[in-house]
Amino acid sequence: MDSFSEQPNGSPAFVAVSTKPVQFAGLYGARVRFRNAMKNLPVSSSDTDVQDAPSRPGDAYVQSFARGLAVIRSFDANRPAQTLTDVAAATGLTRAGARRILLTLQSLGYVEADGRLFQLTPKILDLGFAYLTSMPFWNLAEPVMEDLVEQVHESCSAAVLNGAEIVYVLRVPTHKIITQNLSIGSRLPAFCTSMGRVLLAALDDAQLDAALDASDIVARTPHTITDRDALKDAIALVRRQGWAIVDQELEEGLISMSAPIRDRQGRVIAALNISGNAQRKNAKQMAKAFLDPLQRAAQRVSEMVARRG
């Protein structure tokens, strides 16, 4: 079994959107998932303008561009259409500033207006597709994941770490009914998920402490580990054995097992998981049945990534 190597400070996290049609569940769903994938960008709540980012790089920071991204990000599943006043309130911009940005986005085709209401257009997906063409990693992973699902008859997902959360970058579901409605761009807390623990285990001690400090460590179920020392022990076990299993800590009845995906340098860049119903298999049974095929799949993807360099 693989053991973990620590991931260096500043290692990039990758977020992608799948091109597989079944993943989008319609154009609106795709737009929602694209906006979810952009959640790591800062949004301000200043009364008059976008607040200064605490670590912005001086003269290299283009504030107008940041404001434009804030406007795009203000549209979500709860606010698919907004008035000018809504956008200004959501972003901290003045009405005049929000209007200029909305009209600019409208002239570029990213926003459309219906009376007083503004909404994003399908062209916004071009921004996500640009990533797909530049980062072919997930195109490599998807057929491997499909093979794994066909073999184990359980859902398979891939995720990356973003702060204290994992972000789903690819998912191949089964037709079985599960209560977790997960899709590309979905976010979950890292501390109580198997993919999260695999990714946290790849951090050095300082990075791990920072991630746990930023986590909202609360019980999701009676099984959730919330004691910090016990949680660090669980992550240390993952680091030693090279894989993770989480038994109903995120949701009752949901059990999942994960293995790391590595780049050419051996750094953990993502995690691959199998998730299923705890009533069908307990943790011991799941590990016995699925650990080998899961690790083989993760190794296959890692080798593909290494060859692409």
Image: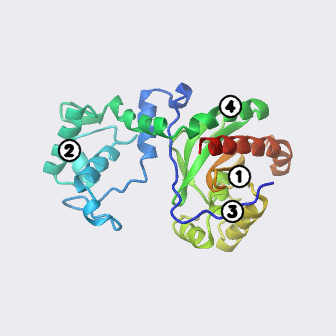
Residue highlighted by disc 3: 5
- Residue 46: x percent and y percent? 25, 62
- Relative to residue 79, is residue 234 drawn left or right? right
How far is mark 1 from mark 4, CA to CA? 24 Å
Q: Is residue 128 left or right of residue 200?
A: left
Mark 1 and mark 4 residues within 8 Å of each other at the beta carbon: no
Vertical placement of residue 119 versus 9, above or below: above
The secondary element bearing badge 2 is classed as helix
Residue occupying image coordinates x 16% and y 50%: 97
Q: In the rendered structure, which amino acid carries the disc numbered 4?
A: Glu
Tell me how far mark 4 sits from mark 3, CA to CA: 28 Å
Q: Is residue 190 shown above or below 179?
A: below
Judge whether 165 appears above or below 232 on screen: above
Give the distance between the C-alpha atoms of the residues marked 1 and 3, in whole angstroms. Answer: 27 Å
The tag earlier along the polypeptide, 2 or 3, is 3
Task: Say which of marks 1 and 4 sits in front.
Answer: 4
Of the residues shown, which amino acid type is indicated by label 3? Answer: Ser
Name the foreground residue: 58 vs 289. Answer: 58
- Asked whether disc 2 touches disc 3, contact meaning CB atoms under 8 Å apart, the reply is no
Contact between marks 4 and 3 (CB within 8 A): the answer is no
Q: Is residue 13 visible?
A: yes
x and y percentages locating residue 277 in the rendered image: 74, 41
Query: Residue at image x 68%, y 35%?
Result: 145
Q: Which residue is mark 1?
A: 248
- Residue linked to disc 2: 101
Q: Residue at x 18, y 35 (%)?
A: 116
